Image (cartoon, grey):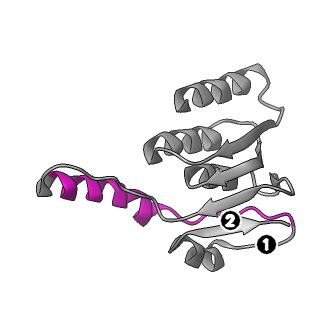
Amino acid sequence: MANIIVAQLLYLDVVDPQKDIVMYVNSPGGSVTAGMAIFDVMRHIRPDVSTVCVGLAASMGAFLLSAGTKGKRYSLPNSRVMIHQPLCGAEGGQTDIDIQVKSYSIYHERSEPVDPPSPTRQFNPKTAAPFFKEIFYVSYL
């Protein structure tokens, strides 16, 4: 799925680099590496990317929702957003687990929290950081 989204973003960039792209997000989340590929392309292309939560944006889905162009992040009235720290499903022997944990910690160490989307509230990355320490749901009802 991530490859399809990346391809569509790149295609829309070529077709009309001046036209905003609207990305509707209804996702329970997914792979950190796949989500970061989408995130990188969202930042790489020329058009602004407007993101809209429809239903649920959880985990990596919430991260991508919040990665839309500042001022162009939206959430429909009955949608929900859930954010938390990245999960690392490490398996194998102790050495394998240590290597996997270290590779995932790169995302935690170098990433700055992205403003959680809100139609009525403004968050800055410093005040948003505590929300990433545990599971946090946002609803706009």
Q: SS at mark 2? A: loop
What numbered label is drawn on residue 9? none
Q: Which residue is mark 1?
A: 122
Q: Can the viewer see residue 68?
A: no
Dot 1 and dot 2 residues touching (CB under 8 Å) = yes
Residue drawn at x 48%, y 65% is 85
Position of 63 relative to 12 (above/below): below
Residue density around tag 1, few if under 14, some if 14–19, many if 20 or more, within 10 Å: few
Residue density around tag 2, few if under 14, some if 14–19, many if 20 or more, within 10 Å: many
Q: Can the viewer see residue 102?
A: yes
Magenta highlight on residue 124: no
Query: What is the magenta range?
Result: 96-119
In percent of width and height, residue 94 lies at 13, 58
In percent of width and height, residue 120 lies at 87, 69
Q: Which residue is mark 2?
A: 115
Q: Which of the 4 image quarters holds residue 129?
A: bottom right
